[in-house]
């Protein structure tokens, strides 16, 4: 690697933080910019690194399918394949008023969902902001706050007319709690570990459903906690309620996950529960962990290895680190930093702002890919406004092509995950719809189209039978439908022990 044409130093800020500073060492006023040919030569190298061939994709799908099957047969696997105790599909005829509570990373959302049958519903909702203090405060206090917000919501929605609650009406509640839990039944969940910046003590290893029930009793609320669910499972059920051809749900956002409906006879690790073998149950895959630790199947580059090694959980969530919105910008930043060090980019300019990990947001890749101008003015804006760097047209074209390579790889790997479930369940011939949600799927340019292209590369023309569509609201509507399904099941005396 040629020596960098920058000088290096560091400055200590008033906060005590040390930042690296890199400047040119030459006296020349104008150091040469990278030429179009230079950038084209480099692009070829990255094309070979980030391009996934159909053959490689099919090999990944094969390994992925085996991993899913292993997770169904044994506990404590890398991809845990968590049984949800959501039995079968909604009929679409579920009716009545149900509450849904969604404890997210930023907000607490409370919804009143009126299911009207025929796949129709109405929703009233309110969001309550969570402070950083609440996320770190005692766990029971956090659930007390959830119950207080629920009480405020219920009281403000009591009245006459449509979408209103009757005084004292007892309501089933679906609680969306999207943090890893081990469940023995649908209204129970032992928190394995907090994620998304939460750290509330006295919660991990405890039954969060029971903790929340205590908070509900404190506030004397006419609410029955019926189901504790993961948002991906809710997305699966809500998507099928509205579109019965939906058989898989995926989330591609800051993280990634999938859920689908499995035959109980094939979930051999819960054989001791004595459930009917011809029943079906939703599975929350937690598939972001695919190929973790061993790293045998996924096409990781050295940039992916750096992202992994410098993350807060090295070795874990290997699949997620290649495709989720949290990491794509960082992968691109690492490539740019390498080219700066090789003396290819930004010669003579001060590049210290690019040295900060995760300073290059995945949203920048979206903007770069969707820049409609010949001069790529949006890319000029990103580099001048956020990093105080000037760019040439050749550099900007290179950045856009690089963003496209990284974004396309993410979509094609996402297609591999979907294809593994399609493979496992034999959905290819009849085809199925896939409810998809998350910022990457909804906002990243061409992401859905690239997923579809990937499915066709894996399956040939039959890949057209698998179609993704924007999912319904899993943590609100899906949670309420699951509460309705669970109430109906228990009222009918079916498997009350789970």
Image (cartoon, grey):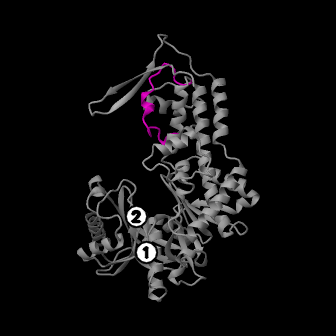
Outermost residue, right side: 461
Residue in the image at 49% along x and 54% along y? 255
Going from N to C along the chain, the mark reached first, 2 or 1, is 1
Classed neighbour count for the residue bearing mark 1: other residues with Cα under 10 Å, few (<14), some (14–19), many (≥20): many
The disc at residue 114 is 1
Quadrant of residue 105 in the image? bottom left
Marks 2, 1: nearer the viewer: 2
- What is the quadrant of the C terminus in the image? bottom left
Quadrant of residue 40 in the image? top right
- Pinpoint residue 313: horizontal percent, then vertical percent: 44, 50
Magenta segment, prevailing SS (helix, strand or loop): loop
- What is the quadrant of the N terminus in the image? top right
The answer to whether residue 366 is seen in the rendering is no
Span shown in magenta:
344-365
**Of residues 86 and 158, the one drawn nearer to the viewer in this rendering:** 86
- Pinpoint residue 267: horizontal percent, then vertical percent: 57, 74
Residue in the image at 63% along x and 52% along y? 297
- Secondary structure, mark 1, is strand
**Of residues 285 and 311, the one drawn nearer to the viewer in this rendering:** 311
- Pinpoint residue 172: horizontal percent, then vertical percent: 38, 78
Confirm or deny contact between disc 2 and disc 1 (CB under 8 A): no
State yes or no: residue 350 in magenta.
Answer: yes
State yes or no: residue 198 in magenta.
Answer: no
Establish if 59 lies above or below 66. above
Is residue 42 rendered to the left or right of residue 175?
right
- Pinpoint residue 68: horizontal percent, then vertical percent: 59, 65
Residue in the image at 48% along x and 85% along y? 495
Residue in the image at 44% along x and 87% along y? 491
Total marks in image:
2
Classed neighbour count for the residue bearing mark 2: other residues with Cα under 10 Å, few (<14), some (14–19), many (≥20): some
The answer to whether residue 167 is seen in the rendering is yes
Residue of label 2:
192
């Amino acid at each position: 690697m040629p020596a960098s044409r920058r000088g290096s130093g560091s400055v200590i800020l008033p906060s005590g933080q040390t930042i690296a500073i890199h400047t040119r060492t030459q006296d020349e006023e104008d150091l040469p910019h990278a030429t179009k040919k230079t950038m084209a030569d480099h692009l070829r190298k990255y094309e070979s690194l980030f391009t996934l061939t159909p053959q490689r994709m099919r090999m990944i799908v094969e390994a992925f399918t085996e991993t899913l099957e292993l997770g169904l047969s044994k506990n404590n696997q890398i991809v845990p394949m968590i049984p949800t105790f959501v039995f079968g599909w909604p009929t679409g005829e579920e009716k009545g008023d149900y509450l849904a509570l969604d404890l997210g990373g930023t907000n607490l959302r409370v919804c009143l969902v009126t299911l009207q049958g025929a796949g129709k519903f109405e929703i009233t909702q309110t969001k309550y902001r969570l402070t950083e203090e609440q996320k770190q405060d005692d766990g029971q206090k956090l659930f007390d706050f959830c119950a207080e917000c629920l009480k405020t919501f219920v009281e403000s929605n009591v009245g006459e007319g449509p979408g209103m609650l009757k005084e004292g009406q007892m309501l089933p509640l679906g609680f969306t709690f999207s943090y890893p839990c081990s469940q023995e039944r649908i209204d129970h969940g032992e928190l394995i570990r907090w994620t998304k910046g939460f750290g509330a003590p006295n919660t991990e290893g405890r039954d969060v459903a029971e903790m929340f029930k205590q908070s509900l009793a404190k506030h004397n609320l006419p609410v029955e906690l019926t189901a504790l669910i993961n948002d991906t499972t809710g997305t699966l059920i809500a998507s099928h309620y509205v579109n019965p051809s939906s058989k898989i749900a995926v989330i591609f956002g800051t993280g990634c996950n999938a859920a689908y409906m499995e035959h109980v006879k094939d979930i051999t690790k819960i054989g001791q529960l004595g459930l009917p073998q011809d029943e079906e149950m939703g599975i929350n895959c937690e598939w972001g962990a695919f190929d973790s630790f061993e790293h045998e199947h996924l096409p990781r580059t050295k940039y992916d290895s750096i992202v992994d090694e410098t993350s807060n959980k090295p070795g874990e969530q290997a699949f997620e680190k290649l495709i989720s919105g949290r990491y794509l910008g960082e992968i691109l930043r690492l490539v740019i930093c390498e080219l700066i060090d090789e003396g290819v980019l930004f010669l003579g300019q001060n590049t210290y702002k690019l040295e900060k990990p995760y300073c290059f947001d995945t949203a920048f890749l979206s903007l770069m890919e969707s820049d409609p101008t010949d001069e790529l003015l949006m890319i000029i804006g990103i580099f001048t406004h956020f990093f105080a760097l000037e760019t040439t047209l050749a550099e900007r074209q290179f950045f856009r092509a690089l963003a496209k390579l990284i974004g396309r790889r993410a979509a094609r790997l996402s297609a591999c995950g979907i294809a593994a479930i399609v493979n496992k369940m034999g959905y290819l011939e009849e085809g199925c719809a896939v409810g998809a949600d998350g910022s990457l799927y909804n906002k990243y340019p061409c992401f859905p189209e690239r997923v579809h292209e990937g499915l066709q590369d894996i399956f040939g023309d039959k890949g057209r039978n698998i179609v993704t569509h924007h999912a319904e609201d899993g943590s609100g509507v899906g949670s309420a439908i699951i509460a309705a399904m669970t109430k109906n099941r228990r009222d009918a005396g079916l498997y009350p022990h789970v």
